[in-house]
Image: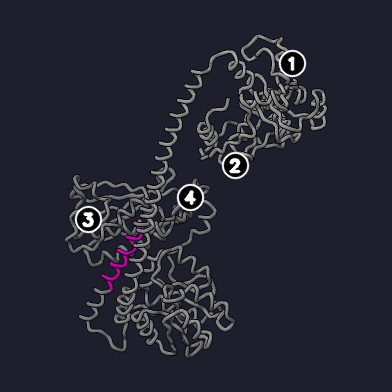
Amino acid sequence: MLPPMAALEKLVGNLGIDNTTHVVILPGGYSAGEMGVATRIYWSLKVVGHDDVSILDGGMSAYATDKSAPLKPGMVTPARKIFKAKFQAQHIATAADVKAGIKGDTRMVDSRPNDQYLGINKSSSVARRGTLPGAVNLPGKWVTEDDGGKFRSADVLKKLFDTVGGVPKGDTIMFCNTGHWASLGWFVQREILGNKKARMYDGSMADWSVGIRTDITDRKNYETELARHRDKLQDMVDDQTQDLIAARDESERANAAKSEFLSSMSHELRTPLNAILGFSQLLKVNTSEPLSAKQQKSVSQILTNGELLLGLIEEILDLSKIETGQLELSLMPVQPDVILNECVSMAQAMAGGRDVVVSEFAMEPSRPQILIDPTRFKQVILNLLSNAVKYNRAGGTVDLNCEIRDDALRIKVVDTGPGIPEDRQQELFQPFQRLGRESSDIEGTGIGLTITKHLVELGFITEPGAGSTFWVEFPVAGAHLSDISDTAKANAVKVSASDQGIADPNSQPNFDTNSKAPFSILYIEDNAANLALMSAMLDEYGKIDLSHAHTGEIGVENAIATPPDLILMDINLPGISGIEALHRLRENDATADVPVIAVSADAIPDHVDAAMKMGFYGYLIKPFDVRVAIDLIFEALNSPKAPAARGQTP
């Protein structure tokens, strides 16, 4: 007999089947008995409400005879799924239905072999004597070819039923000794010959004969009590499931709120930082009104601390993405030496004023490629080198070297600092923990090493008074290239917002202002400080006619009335957003080809990527490097038509 619905739900789900799975049942294909098992399973799935089920006629025997059919050794272990049963009573007949059917017009078809139907075979417990009153006998073995694993044709099956009075058209109950032979007859009637009123007596003569020979009061009482406990247990499971779902939803809401808060905080901090760093850069390079040495030193302090604040914002956002599972890595095979040498050069510049020597990096063109996300790889190496420089002693050294270990490249950063006391090593990777250096003059946030530990497997050895060695390992690309998805390869080349930094303020922008004069630029921006910064930037170069609109609607109207050579567009505007403004500009013939550069404090990579795909010429993330911004602006002005993505992108 069928087990309880809850047990069937679990059984079906454990087979990797949910309510949308198409199920194909594969009998062995060698006997009618195997087909009986297959139809029994088919019927059981129908009873629990799974309608997308098929049986492979002929079974594995017929399938394997086709030499082109794919086969594999071993067995498959399915991933468990959730299946929800919906009881379908039209497929099943109960003992009460049988009793009513005997007295009514229901057709009873006994699918047992002839000898059991006639009562000749009494050798086993399944060979019940006699049959139901009025039942006809059509043995289940007859419906397959030669008692085998393939159903007879519909025409032959009709002829078989003709021997017992024809194919039933109305309510029919199939039964046998225990149910398997009856499922063959039920399947043939319902699925091949089309009698949708065919039902099967689950348990059949085994259940019927026990019921008429014995007092089943105790059994019924037991079943009632068992059902009560089962229902109570199911209620408990349902309650616990709802509690877990509620806890999960609450956690997801908390993570979403946290991400939204940090994103908003980043935006709000970046906007004033844009003015602080931007005007500081302009003061630094102002040749018409040069600063005194003392003023230059003060401006340098503003720039340095502004960069530190920007780095803190980036690190907090990175840590939040890691904790909420939103940080995505784009792996690709890369020869690491160029990035490593660049990191060492940056560390040498950092060490210049600290009486610390960072050794030259020994580049080896033969070094194998490794699987990395280039942006995060650079972030990891810079974090390790930066710590090795900052927490070193006067006259100390820092070395970066590489070695192959099995199928991985180990990169080690060795310093001669004071080391880490054993009783504080457990605090090393805790966020905002600086091991007692919080009150020192060493800049830092205590987040970098925490992020590094989350991104890679990080090892270290340290000896108080003698220094520390930190190392990370990355897989060599040759043996692992197949592990990278095509999507990851396609999206692998990205540049981090943290890589843009603030360039050397004494460097000069690279552009040609002689191709046209004057240029007309429309800046759609609602923040007065950012507008003033852009105006001051462009004043340095003349030949620029800068106009302004403080909303997207006004900006679009002005651009269509007098198309400029370039539009600078904030994304978060009052009224329509910069994205909507771009759509309207592209839909108008007058502005369809005018390049538009996004200038926004929104540094979320997905948002930047989405904006670029919508047709922006470039994307400047506030706070931006003045020289990078000027280069991008004049590149766009000198370009006949907006090309693919440019500018500072995360």
Residue on which disc 3 sits: 434
The mark closer to the camera, 4 or 3, is 3
Residues at marks 1 and 3 touching, judged by CB atoms closer than 8 Å: no
Q: Which quarter of the rendered picture does the C terminus lie within?
A: bottom left
Classify mark 4: helix, strand or loop: helix
Report the magenta residues as a range: 303-319
Q: Which residue is mark 2?
A: 21
Between residue 420 and residue 66, name the one nearer to us: 66
* Nearer to us in this view, 643 or 246: 246
Count the labels in the image: 4
Question: Please, what is the three-letter code of the amino acid marked with disc 1?
Answer: Asn
Task: Give the mark nearest the N terminus, 1 or 2.
Answer: 2
Q: Residues within 10 Å of mark 3 (few under 14, many from 20)?
A: some
Residue 364 visible in the shown view: no
**Which tag, 3 or 2, sits closer to the chain's start?**
2
- Residue, disc 1: 114
How many angstroms separate mark 3 from mark 2 (CA)?
54 Å
Does residue 75 appear to the left or right of 318 in the view shown?
Answer: right
Question: Disc 4 to disc 3, how far (Cα)?
Answer: 35 Å
Query: What's the residue type where badge 4 is placed?
Result: Ala
Please name the residue that numbered disc 4 is placed on.
477
Q: In the figure, is residue 117 to the left or right of 507?
A: right
| Residue 324 drawn at (x, y percent) | 38, 53
Displayed quadrant of residue 163:
top right
Q: Please tell me which residue lies in front, 126 or 346.
A: 126
- State the residue at coordinates (49%, 58%): 492
Q: Secondary structure at mark 3?
A: loop
Label 1 CA crowd tier, 10 Å (few <14, some 14–19, many 20+): some
The numbered mark, 1 or 4, whose residue comes first in the sequence reads 1
For disc 2, the neighbor class at 10 Å (few under 14, some 14 to 19, many from 20) is few
